[in-house]
Image: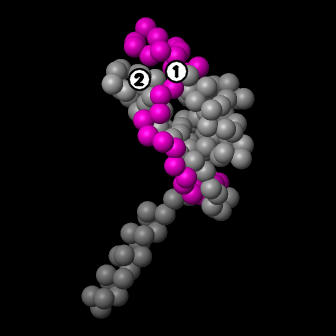
Amino acid sequence: MKKSLLLLALTALVAACSVDPQAAHERRVKLIQQIFPNQADQKGLFLVFPIEVYGYYATLDIIYFPDEVSESTVKKRVGKYCAQFKNRGATGQAYPRDPSKPVTVTVADGTTRPAQEIWLSCVEKK
């Protein structure tokens, strides 16, 4: 009886933790639109996760599809984003925190796809 109850509880816990790929996609799209309102700047992006530093979103965790957008284009887009914060110490350029790295992401239809992840900041690392 105890084993059955434990198995049932574990099954319920796992089911509660499963992520709806479509709902996750919709949340990612909203974040991307907040940072890059121009639709052309959203092309090829899977995730843009802003981190608040210096009182604004100065660091961005970005996952993109290299077959749709190049890393240099992503950096230019972030540079344009950063330009709005020049009065707060930003230079209008995107500075990588770490080199980009390959990742695998799950897209809205539940399939996986190769992508690249890069952390970019509006402020040069000292």
Among all residues in the image, which is located at the extreme top? 87
Give the image location of residue 97, x and y in percent. 42, 35
Residue at 61%, 51% (x, y): give it: 115
Q: Can residue 87 be seen in this view?
A: yes
Figure check: 46 above or below 108: above
Which residue in the protein does label 1 denote? 93
Q: Can you tell which quarter of the image residue 55 is in? A: top left
Eyeballing the image, is 81 above or below 64? Answer: above
Camera sees residue 50: no
C-alpha separation, residue under disc 2 versus residue under disc 1: 9 Å
> Dot 1: few (<14), some (14–19), or many (≥20) neighbours within 10 Å?
many
- Report the span colored magenta: 80-108
Q: What residue type is labelled 2?
A: Glu
Determine if the magenta segment contains residue 94.
yes
Residue located beneath label 2 in the image: 124
Label 2's element? loop
Pick the residue in front: 16 or 31. 31
- The amino acid beneath tag 1 is Gln
SS at mark 1? Answer: loop
Q: Which residue is drawn at 51% across and 59% down?
A: 19
Mark 2 neighbour class, 10 Å CA radius: few under 14, some 14 to 19, many 20 or more:
some
The image's colouring method is one colour
